[in-house]
Image: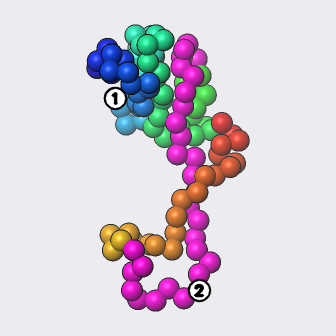
Amino acid sequence: AIDLLAGLGVKRILTSGQQPNAGEGKANIRDFVKYAGSRIGIMACGELLPENIGNLLDIEGLTEYHSAARKEVESGMQYTGSVNMGDEAVQDEFRWHEVDEELVKGM
């Protein structure tokens, strides 16, 4: 797949190393980076947080990391009413995610 994607002009592959998270996929990520060389970027992803991103820093050539460094924010809205203002599938339309600056700084 790396050869095909590089040949098509894709710039990077986002991967957790074919595992549930990047920590478990570290060996595969290392192999992907080595195989890809400079033809295509490999970006590690999958539950990357300050407490575990260091585990990937020894992979030579891995320079891109994707993290969902976020926090949930609750609306200060007092009146919520009984009619959903958006997608009915959204369980709580008065909460959302924002970047957690402290998590980003920790990485």
Question: In the picture provided, is 24 more to the left or to the right than 76?
Answer: left
Residue on which the image places disc 1: 18
Picture disc at residue 78 = 2
Residue visible at 42% across and 35% down in the picture = 21
The residue segment tinted magenta is 58-86
| Residue 60 among magenta residues | yes
**Residue 11 in view, yes or no:** yes
For label 1, the crowd category at 10 Å Cα-Cα, with few meaning under 14, some 14 to 19 and many 20 or more, is: few
| Label 1 element class | loop
Residue visible at 43% across and 13% down in the picture = 39
Amino acid tagged 1: Gln
Residue visible at 39% across and 86% down in the picture = 83
Pinpoint residue 52: horizontal percent, then vertical percent: 57, 34
Amino acid tagged 2: Gln
For label 2, the crowd category at 10 Å Cα-Cα, with few meaning under 14, some 14 to 19 and many 20 or more, is: few
> Is residue 41 depicted above or below 97 in this figure?
above
Q: Main secondary structure of the magenta part?
A: loop
Pinpoint residue 35: horizontal percent, then vertical percent: 40, 10
Pinpoint residue 56: horizontal percent, then vertical percent: 55, 24
